[in-house]
């Protein structure tokens, strides 16, 4: 079974988030999933995940959602400082 998911994050900080998590694309989290991350304009981040099975898809989604969330939270904290 092959699965895929695509999510679009619209935020003013899309480009900064993209730059923050881009090095993680070089890491091979799993042999059973492939990750795509692109910018569309300055405020739209697109995450694409293709996986061999539901477990791999869920794992990759959890990992990348958390990475994006952490990057956003760091940007918010540093903007207040």
Image (cartoon, grey):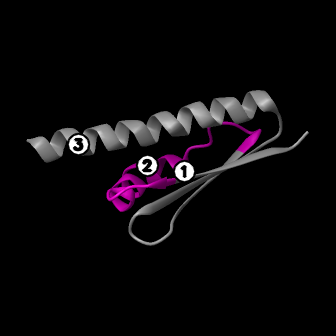
**Circle 1 residues within 10 Å: few <14, some 14–19, many ≥20:** few
Q: Residue at x 63, y 36 (%)?
A: 60
Judge whether residue 80 is colored magenta. no
* Residue numbers of the magenta segment: 9-33
* Residue that sits furthest to the left in the current view: 81
Which residue does the numbered mark 3 point to in the structure image? 76
Point out the tag, 3 or 2, that comes first from the N-terminus.
2
Q: Is the C-beta separation of discs 1 and 2 under 8 Å?
A: yes
Judge whether residue 20 is colored magenta. yes
Q: CA distance from mark 1 to mark 2?
A: 7 Å
Which element is circle 2 on?
Answer: helix
The answer to which quarter of the image holds residue 41 is bottom left
Foreground residue, 2 or 13? 13
Q: CA distance from mark 3 to mark 2?
A: 16 Å
Q: Residue at x 76, y 27 (%)?
A: 55
Q: Which callout, 3 or 2, points to the residue nearer the camera?
A: 3
Which residue does the numbered mark 2 point to in the structure image? 21
Which element is circle 3 on?
Answer: helix
Q: Is the C-beta separation of discs 3 and 1 under 8 Å?
A: no
* Residue 71 percent across, percent down from the top left: 35, 42
The answer to which quarter of the image holds residue 27 is top right
**Circle 2 residues within 10 Å: few <14, some 14–19, many ≥20:** some
Point out the tag, 3 or 1, that comes first from the N-terminus.
1
In this picture, residue 9 sits left or right of residue 35 = left
Q: Residue at x 76, y 47 (%)?
A: 4
Which residue does the numbered mark 1 point to in the structure image? 25
In this picture, residue 44 sits left or right of residue 32 = left
């Amino acid at each position: 079974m092959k699965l895929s998911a695509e999510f679009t994050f619209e935020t003013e900080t899309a480009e900064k988030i993209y730059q923050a998590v881009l090095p993680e694309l070089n890491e091979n989290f799993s042999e059973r999933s492939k990750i795509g991350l692109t910018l569309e304009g300055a405020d739209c981040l697109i995450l694409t995940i293709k996986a061999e099975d539901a477990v791999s898809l869920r794992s990759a989604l959890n990992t990348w959602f958390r990475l994006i969330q952490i990057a956003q939270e760091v940007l918010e904290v540093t903007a207040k400082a």
